[in-house]
Image (cartoon, rainbow, N blue to C red):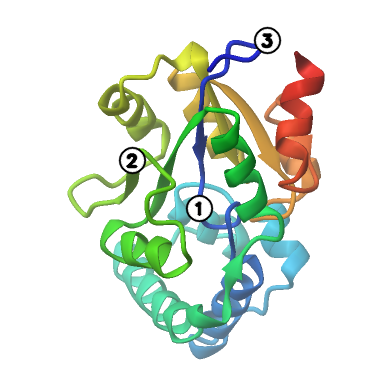
Amino acid sequence: MMNARGITHIVWDWNGTLFCDSELVVQATCETFAALGLPPLTAEQYRSSYTHPVGAFYERVLGRPVPAGELATINQLFHDAYHRRIDECALTPGAADVLTAWQRRGGSQSLLSLYAHDRLVPLVGRLGLAGVFVRVDGRHEALPGLKAEHMVAHLREIGVPGECTLVVGDTVDDAHAAAQAGARCLLHAGGQQTREVLASAGVPVVERLADVLVHVDRAA
């Protein structure tokens, strides 16, 4: 299957894109800051300041360097708070429909996330998406870093060239990863960063996942 833009494959991001956990992420961050006596953070401050790697985000919102030991403590408290309530989260509205629609068109799709691989795989299955993706890659401890460092390897494992690929994510980092692999990118404004931040990446931005295939068709 190839549409008029030459796109045969979509690489989806998980957190904040297919998985609707952005509110929980902000709440877990606020809980972590409160536990450590750090300044409170609003949802708007979070989304306008969020960046990768996460250490740079904390330095940005705190206005100072964050030593490795403090960063490890913040990360542990955040993940504890996040995973206590992760079962409250579900797929982003429209996610299941757009995944099914792309399948029906004959396109292939995969999942690339910086969420821990050993947590990602069972969560994808629990939410009814087992078998939807030709490959699911989460973060391994041996492979830290930015998503751009993993996108090329992800597509190589699948055997799909970048020029035939559309990356759909919710952060500027997703756009950087797509560019690294020679792929196109579309960003979803309902996730980790504000629309204004996403616009700085210089790629199209949509409000709803339902608009992803609409965008592909219109661009064709």
- How far apart, in angstroms, are the residues tagged by discs 2 and 1? 13 Å
What amino acid is found at the position of numbered circle 1 in the picture?
Answer: Trp
Comparing 184 with 146, the one in front is: 184
For label 2, the crowd category at 10 Å Cα-Cα, with few meaning under 14, some 14 to 19 and many 20 or more, is some
In this rendered view, identify the residue nearer to me: 128 or 31: 128
> Is 199 drawn above or below residue 9 in the view shown?
below
Residue 58 at x, y percent in the picture: 52, 61
The residue indicated by pointer 2 is 135
Relative side of 64 to 202, left or right = left
From where the camera sits, is residue 112 visible?
yes
Assign a secondary structure to mark 1: loop
- Looking at the image, tell me whether mark 2 or mark 3 is earlier in sequence order: 3
Which residue corresponds to the image point at 29% horizontal and 56% vertical from the top-left? 117
Residue 6 x, y percent position in the rendering = 58, 11
- Which tag is nearer the camera, tag 1 or tag 3? 3
Q: Where on the picture, by quarter, is residue 45?
A: bottom right
Which of the two discs, 1 and 3, labels the residue nearer the N terminus?
A: 3
Q: Which residue is mark 1?
A: 14
Asked whether the beta carbons under mark 2 and mark 1 sit within 8 Å of each other, the answer is no
- In what element is the residue under mark 3? loop
> Which residue is rendered at x = 32% and y = 31% of the image?
154
Task: Give x and y (percent) for residue 21.
Answer: 59, 67
Q: Which residue is mark 3?
A: 4
> Label 1 to label 3, Cα distance in Å?
26 Å
Residue 121 in the image: above or below residue 200: below
